[in-house]
Amino acid sequence: MIRQGVIALLGRADSPTDAVEEYCKYLGEALRDRGISLAIERLAWAERGWRRALRSLRHRAKAWKDTWVLVQYTALAWSARGFPLRFSSVLGTLRRAGARVGVVYHDVEPFPGTRPIDRLRRRTQLRAMRHAMHLCDVAVFTVPMEKLSWVKPQYSHSVFIPVGANLPVARESVSRKGTASDGKLNVGVFSVTGGSATQREISEIVEAVRFASSQVKNLKLTILGRNSKETEGEFRKRLNGIPVELRVLGVLSSENVVRTLFSGDVLLFVRGPISTRRGSAIAGIACGLPVIAAEGPETSSFIKEAGVAFYSPQKKGDLGEVLLHVLQDEHYRASLAQRSWIAQQHYFSWNVIAARYAEFLGTPQTPSAAPTE
């Protein structure tokens, strides 16, 4: 029985897939089991302009008095170029309407960069993020607050809730196996970062696979998700002459992503340091895979408890060495997979995430459901 209604307010949609919208959909499904309905609303500022969008929000928010509105924050959802100057106006409109405002920080730090425009963008984002802390009733961070550079100890209305995998990972469906059905060891890559990071990521992946293939036969590299089709030509060129089967699958349905990851043996994550907000890395954990990734400032104990084998980007060839170890040592690989499965159940399942939300949304939960950092 539904006892409470909650709104998730999103800004501009991302493409070709919108991870934040998918996050809200999976969260909504889990909250429904706790008697909470989550309705997804968008502020169409990109299509209608800010003036008309805010006027529409003022009208809609009249019906949201005393209702929780969870505003999903990424800088690019509220500004085309990452200058979220109007984000405070969104929160202020909700507060004046009497809504209970939560801000979910999917971007937890301002964008990096050394150019003058980057520094200006960073200052603008920090101002928006800090102002949002003063305007909201609860702030949800997808990494532990102590890992962040700008969060102050007096922000006592904050809660850490890691993201889950935006995938239909049913508990009974998880069944790991040692090798893929064709007898080949299958190395997965879920999404490639576009823009300036693309060439670095391709180089790291190719060098690691080249090194591993010199000592491991029957190796397969499967690349799927964002920018996989766009980078297929470069991967094939660089892997030419290397005894590795390459499969490039593009953007798949969530069901096919799960099916593909389940058939893998290890996931390479080279899109920056791993953390509890990196959904493409959490996907590997959710599917019971060993994950090879770099440690960074946002890497919490939840990640370290999962089946993550860490490599050092500063140590030349280390990614290949770690990959080779995982592929050659079947017992080590199995232990990492088991740790991922346990971490998924303890920290990253949508049921556990929904329980953490229910704490402040006002719905009772079982005391053992919520993780602590």
Image (cartoon, grey):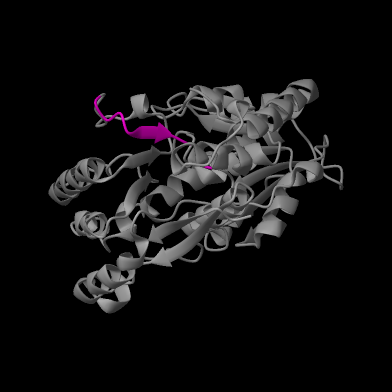
Residue in view at x 13 percent, y 48 percent: 116
Q: Is residue 159 magenta?
A: yes
Residue displayed at 29% across by 60% down: 78
| Left or right of residue 68: residue 162 | right
Give 45 or 38, whichever is nearer the viewer: 38
Q: Position of residue 37 (x, y in %)?
A: 54, 57
Q: On the picture, is 367 further left or further right than 157?
A: right
Horizontal relation, residue 25 to residue 156: left or right: right
x then y, percent, for residue 142 = 43, 38
Report x, y in % for residue 320: 60, 30
The vertical placement of 58 against 116, above or below, is below
Rendering coords of residue 49 (x, y %): 24, 75
Q: Quadrant of residue 59?
A: bottom left
Out of 291 and 339, give the one closest to the viewer. Answer: 339
Decide if residue 80 is in sight here: yes
* Magenta range: 154-163
Quarter of the image with the N terminus is: bottom right
